[in-house]
Image (spheres, rainbow, N blue to C red):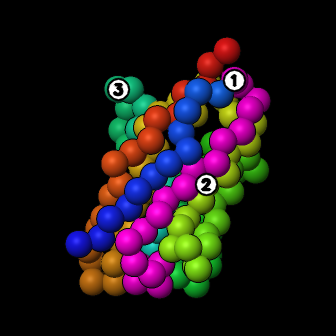
């Protein structure tokens, strides 16, 4: 069973930064795609950023230029650097991993609150 453990959430003022981490229990090359999703109150979960095994990155339009997804293969960890945070970025952020055979794994989520 794969475990994904997120960390790094918290309270930050508008314009501030946070870095989320997602530590996987096995090699990142075990997964076809790893991504960060978020779910705000009373809204559907949305994909924020994703990175493929080959290193291709994709972002939802609202975070382009502000968020950066990256990975450290040696630490089996994926990061989400979030800059210039806005109140509308407030959500629970989830790490996800998709296996090559269609399996899907989720972390427990970490809360990000952007407020003055």
* Residue under the point 42% across and 49% down: 94
Query: Residue 24 vs residue 16: left or right?
Result: left
Query: Residue 8 vs residue 12: left or right?
Result: left
Mark pair 3, 2: CA separation: 23 Å
Mark pair 1, 2: CA separation: 17 Å
Q: Element type at marker 3?
A: loop
Regarding residue 32, the answer to whether it shows in the image is no
Q: Element type at marker 2?
A: strand
Q: Position of residue 86 (x, y in %)?
A: 66, 29
Residue that sits furthest to the left in the current view: 1
* Residue under the point 40% across and 78% down: 26
Badge 3 or badge 1: first in the primary sequence: 1
Q: How many numbered marks, from 0 up? A: 3
- Per the rendered image, the range of residues in magenta is 13-32
Q: Element type at marker 1?
A: loop
Image: 78 above or below 88:
below
Badge 1 or badge 2: first in the primary sequence: 1
Judging by the rendered image, the residue that carries numbered circle 1 is 13
Judging by the rendered image, the residue that carries numbered circle 2 is 80
User: Closest to the observer: 27 or 81?
Assistant: 27
Q: Image quadrant of residue 49? A: bottom right
* Residue under the point 38% across and 72% down: 25
Q: Residues within 10 Å of mark 1 (few under 14, many from 20)?
A: some
Q: Position of residue 104 (x, y in %)?
A: 29, 68
Which numbered disc, 3 or 2, marks the residue closer to the eye?
A: 2
Q: Image quadrant of residue 78? A: bottom right
Kindly identify which numbered label has been placed on residue 42.
3
């Amino acid at each position: 069973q794969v475990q994904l453990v997120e960390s790094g959430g918290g309270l930050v003022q508008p314009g501030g930064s946070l870095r989320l981490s997602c530590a996987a229990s096995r090699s990142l090359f075990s997964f076809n795609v790893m991504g960060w999703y978020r779910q705000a109150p009373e809204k559907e979960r949305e994909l924020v950023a994703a990175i493929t095994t080959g290193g291709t990155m994709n972002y939802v339009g609202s975070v382009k230029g502000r968020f950066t997804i990256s990975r450290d293969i040696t630490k089996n960890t994926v990061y989400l650097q979030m800059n210039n945070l806005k109140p509308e970025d407030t959500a629970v952020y989830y790490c996800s991993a998709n296996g090559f055979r269609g399996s899907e794994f989720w972390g427990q989520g970490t809360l990000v609150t952007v407020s003055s």
